[in-house]
Amino acid sequence: MTDAAVGAAARLERLFEGRRLTPTQRRIAHCLVRQAADVPYLSSVELARVAGVSQPSVTRFAAALGFDGYPALRDHLRAVAPTGHGFDERPTNPYQRAVQAEIDNLRHLASLLTDPEPVERAGRLLAASRPLPVLGLRASAAQARGFAYFAAKVHPDVRLLDEGGSLLADRVDAARRAGASALLCFALPRHPRELLDTLAHARGVGLTVVTVADGTFAPVAAHSDLLLPAAVGTDLVFDTAGAPQLLGQVLLETMCDALPDAQARLEDFDLRAAARGLFVE
């Protein structure tokens, strides 16, 4: 994806902000963002095939965005898309296409990070929360566990919430009573209803919710105080999460920047690990 295409994708995301889209419509929106340079040259039938939905769904999607029909939406897309959609430059192998889509997602993330203020503000919120609950259920559990593993090296009290059930709200309450001020959530598709209930509960007890989600139009947006978007890849049977994982690492970096003793904690861990022979050199 060229820099112009990345900019077009960012402008398209703003088109969806604040919209209550159905899961099918969110799928179409993801397709538009991922292939911002190509989609404006497709018919509604072709877009439906690329997005894996029906042609009437594309028509309803255009209406949901306030356009008279798909032709009006396509005219708008052409106005914000870069010239030269470059079909011939894209890979034809389905595995290559999946990798290219992931690269495009990372380029889009890089474009969003042009303004570092949101992710830096998130880092400060997470650093100040003692304890820091980190939530991720089902498909998002891996991202939550990875973040919590590294965060525990620099943050004095990280609490991983990666299992659902009736105890989940209790664990949120316990973190709040212990002094937590913020909660970090990883919310990748498909979004469990239980996750939305938990985020609503967390905000209800006074926690500031920071969410890494697959887009600003994700269902969790309404339950988040600060949403950081990172698109997932949908070209394989199961979604790929290169961009959300990298955004999690960026969040770790900004959190470390906000923790004055982060470096000292890392050095102490390295000394203890060496004394125990923990790692193979």
Image: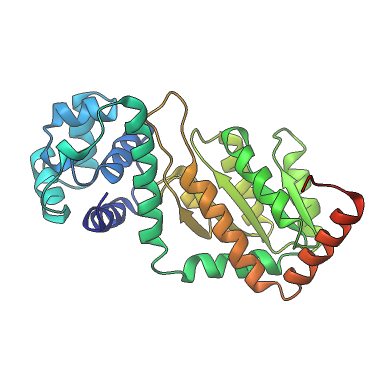
Please provide percent x and percent y for residue 114.
38, 67
**Residue 20, quarter of picture:** top left
**Residue 86, quarter of picture:** top left
Q: Is residue 35 above or below residue 123?
A: above
Q: Is residue 274 above or below residue 40?
A: below
Comparing 166 with 100, the one in front is 100
Please provide percent x and percent y for residue 131.
77, 60
State the count of labels. 0
* Residue in the picture at 54% in, 47% down: 245
Q: Is residue 153 above or below residue 201?
A: below
Task: Name the residue furthest bottom.
Answer: 260
* Residue in the picture at 60% in, 40% down: 195
* Residue in the picture at 44% in, 49% down: 230
Q: How is the image coloured?
A: rainbow
| Horizontal side, residue 281 vs residue 17: left or right | right
Task: Name the residue furthest right.
Answer: 275
Comparing 71 with 266, the one in front is 266
Q: Is residue 169 above or below residue 251?
A: above
**Residue 115, quarter of picture:** bottom left
Comparing 98 with 81, the one in front is 98
Please provide percent x and percent y for residue 233.
41, 37
